[in-house]
Image: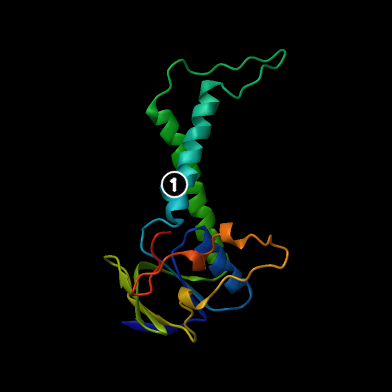
């Protein structure tokens, strides 16, 4: 299995992963992005936000709910709208987002690997490739597990901190992983 050194290894190509990888690469860091799914974008682009909002907006548009009358203009919509009409627009929007993400990764010269990431040690991540994929063991100089970081409160925040929830207010299990988010 190939071994390669990176300044940053990002697991997941969702909005935060994509933006974080691109920003690090923009500032000259060597970056690897590992995505286990065949499509880039995470849940936001594939199953959650983008598809559901697109279907909602398509329904509103096709229903004429948001259409205002314009003097001298008439808009005719189909009497019967099918599921195919809805899904056509949703597919176009999702495919456009996949292209945008792939173009952004290519523009910033980020190495993209398809497979499931697993920590080997504090400085090594193994990528278990999908069928017909190339294996990789990226290594990076420093490890920063999430439990080493703590939120910093601004002096401009209100004094009633009891009502404010941060990542450090979550319950932690015995193994140190975050539970009950």
Q: Give the residue drawn at x 53%, y 78%.
A: 30
- The quarter of the image holding the C terminus is bottom left
Q: Give the residue drawn at x 44%, y 35%.
A: 88
Q: Quadrant of residue 39?
A: bottom left
Q: How is the model colour-coded?
A: rainbow
Q: Could you tell whether 90 is left or right of 155 in the image?
A: left
- The residue sitting at the bottom extreme is 141
Residue 174 rendering spot, x and y as whole percentages: 34, 74
Residue 122 rendering spot, x and y as whole percentages: 40, 84
- The quarter of the image holding the N terminus is bottom left
The foreground one among 169 and 107 is 169
Residue 10 rendering spot, x and y as whole percentages: 47, 71
Q: Give the residue drawn at x 33%, y 75%.
A: 175
Q: Quadrant of residue 108?
A: bottom right
- The residue sitting at the top extreme is 72
Q: How many marks?
A: 1
- Is 89 situated above or below 153? above
| Crowd band around label 1 with a 10 angstrom C-alpha radius: few (<14), some (14–19), many (20+) | few
The foreground one among 156 and 12 is 156
Which residue in the protein does label 1 denote? 48
- Is 44 situated above or below 137? above
- Is 12 situated above or below 148? above
The foreground one among 28 and 148 is 148
The foreground one among 99 and 33 is 33
Q: Give the residue drawn at x 35%, y 82%.
A: 2
Residue 160 rendering spot, x and y as whole percentages: 64, 59
As helix, strand or loop, the secondary structure at mark 1 comes to loop
């Amino acid at each position: 299995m190939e071994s390669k050194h990176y300044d940053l290894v990002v697991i997941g190509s969702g909005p935060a992963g994509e933006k974080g990888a691109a920003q690090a690469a923009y500032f000259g860091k060597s970056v690897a992005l590992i995505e286990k799914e065949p499509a880039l974008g995470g849940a936001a682009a594939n199953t959650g936000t983008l598809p559901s909002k697109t279907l909602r907006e398509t329904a509103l548009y096709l229903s004429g709910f948001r259409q205002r009358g314009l003097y001298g203009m008439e808009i005719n919509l189909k009497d019967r709208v099918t599921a195919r009409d809805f899904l056509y627009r949703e597919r176009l929007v999702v495919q456009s987002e996949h292209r945008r993400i792939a173009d952004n990764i290519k523009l910033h010269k980020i190495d993209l690997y398809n497979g499931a990431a697993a920590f080997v040690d504090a400085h090594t991540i193994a990528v278990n490739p999908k069928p017909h994929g190339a294996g990789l063991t990226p290594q990076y100089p420093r490890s920063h597990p999430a439990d080493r970081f703590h939120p910093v409160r601004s002096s401009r925040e209100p004094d009633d901190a009891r009502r404010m929830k941060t990542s450090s207010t979550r319950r932690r299990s015995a193994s140190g992983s975050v539970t009950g988010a």
